[in-house]
Amino acid sequence: MPIVLNASERHRLKKMAHGHVHVDTVRTWRGRFAAGGLPALADRKCSRRPARFTSVQVSEAKALACQLPAETGTPLSHWSCPELADELTARGITGTVSVSTVRRWLHQETLKPWQHRSWIFIRDPDFRAKAQQVLDLYARTFEGILLGPDEYVISSDEKTSIQARCRCHPTLAPGQARAMRVSHEYGRGGALAYLAAYDVHRATVFGRCEPKTGIVPFMSLVKQVMAQEPYASAKRVFWIVDNGSSHRGQRSIDRLAARFPNAVLVHTPVHASWLNQVEIFFSIVQRKVVSPNDFTDLTQVRDRLRAFEDRYSATAQPFQWRFTTTDLDELLARLDRHTLTDRQEESSVDLAACSTPEGLPGPTTEVRPGTRGPSRVRGQRRRHVRHTL
C-alpha cells in the first residue's frame, strides 16, 4: 500500500524503492494497480510446487536429530545429514528425502548433531575457598592482608613426555610463498619431563629437565629456586600447584614446610589447573619451542629449553590476569542454576518412572526442536589473561 500511495504523489521509482524493495518490485506493483485498481493488489494464487513434507514430518526429523543414535538402537556415536536422511526413510517418517533437505531443516534450528563438547562439574567441596586463595595471591593478597615486598608467589607444575623426534629428512626453512616443511617420518630419541616454576609478579622462569616426574624431582625444583635470592631470604614464598601426585594433599604441605620454613604450598581446586599461571607458560613453550618437534636427541631438547628460559625471563612481562573473585562468584552462581535445573529434571523423570505401571510405556516427553533443554556447563579453559613476548 505505501508503494501505491507514493505513486499517487508521483515519487520517482528509485526514491520509492530506497531501503525497502527493489525497483523492479515497485514497477510491478504500480503496474498491477494501474491495470486493476485495489482488487489487483490482493494476493494471487501461488504457482509454486506444493510442499512434499508436512510440518509434523519436519518436526519429527528435527526431534530425531536431537536424540543420541545409541538411544534409538543405531550403532553410531552421532548423526550426520546423510545418515539422518537414511534413518528417516527407514523408519517411515518421510519418504525419500535428500541430504540437502535434511541439512536445510537442521539449519533452520541451528542443529549440529555431528558436533560435541565436553564438560565437567565441580567436585571439590572447597572449590571457592581454594580458588579465591589463588586469585588473592595473584592480586598480592593473602588472608585479607597485602603481601610485602619480601613475599613472592611462584606458580609451578610439570610438562610431561616431551619427546625428541629426529626427522628422517632435514627440515626445510620457509621461503617465499612457502611454509616451513617438516618431514612426517621420524625416529624416537626418548622423552623427558620439564618442570617449571614461574614467578607470577616478576615474570621469571626456573626450570629443570628430569627423566620422569615425582616427589624427588619436584623437591629438586623447589631447592633450585629456594637456594637463590631473593627467595632464600624472603619472608614467605607461596608455591601454587595443582593436585598432581608429586605435590598432593597435606603431606606435601608438611614436607615442603619442613624442608623450607618460609615456603607455603597452595593447592588449586581439583580439576582447576587453568587457575595455575604456569600452564600459560607451558602453552608458550609448546608453540615456540617444542612444535614442530625436530630434535636429534634429548640433550638438544634440554639445551633449547634452558636457552628459552633465559630469553623469556629477559623479555617477558607478567601476565595480566583478569579472572577475579567477582568472576568466580558469577561462575559458581551459574553452575548452581544449572545444577538445580538438572536435579529438577532428574526428579521429574524419577517420579514419572515410579508412577508408570510396569510393562506399560511411560509418559511421552515432548521434544520441541529449536529449544534448549537444561544447559550443561562445559569445562572451558579460558585464559583471562593477555601476555606479550
Image (cartoon, rainbow, N blue to C red):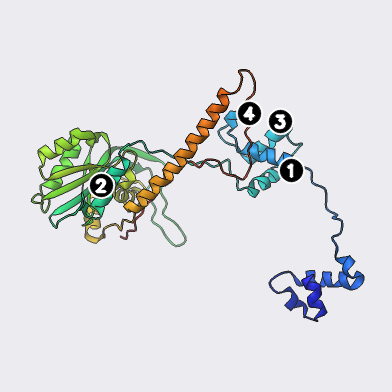
Secondary structure state at the residue bearing disc 3: helix
Q: Are marks 4 and 3 in contact (CB under 8 Å)?
A: no
Please say whether residue 211 is visible from this viewpoint: no
Q: Which residue is mark 1?
A: 55
> Label 4 amino acid?
Pro
Report the disc number at residue 133: 2
Please say whether residue 143 is visible from this viewpoint: yes
Cα distance between the residues tagged 1 and 3: 17 Å
Reading the chain from its start, which is encountered first: label 1 or label 4? 1
In the image: residue 354, left or right of residue 4:
left
**What residue occupies the far top of the structure in this picture?**
358
Which residue is painted at 58% across and 41% down in the image? 113
Secondary structure state at the residue bearing disc 4: loop
Q: Quadrant of the N terminus?
A: bottom right
> Label 3 amino acid?
Arg
Q: Which tag is nearer the camera, tag 2 or tag 3?
A: 2
In the image: residue 123, left or right of residue 92:
left
Q: Which residue is mark 3?
A: 91
Reading the chain from its start, which is encountered first: label 2 or label 3? 3
Q: Which tag is nearer the camera, tag 4 or tag 2?
A: 4
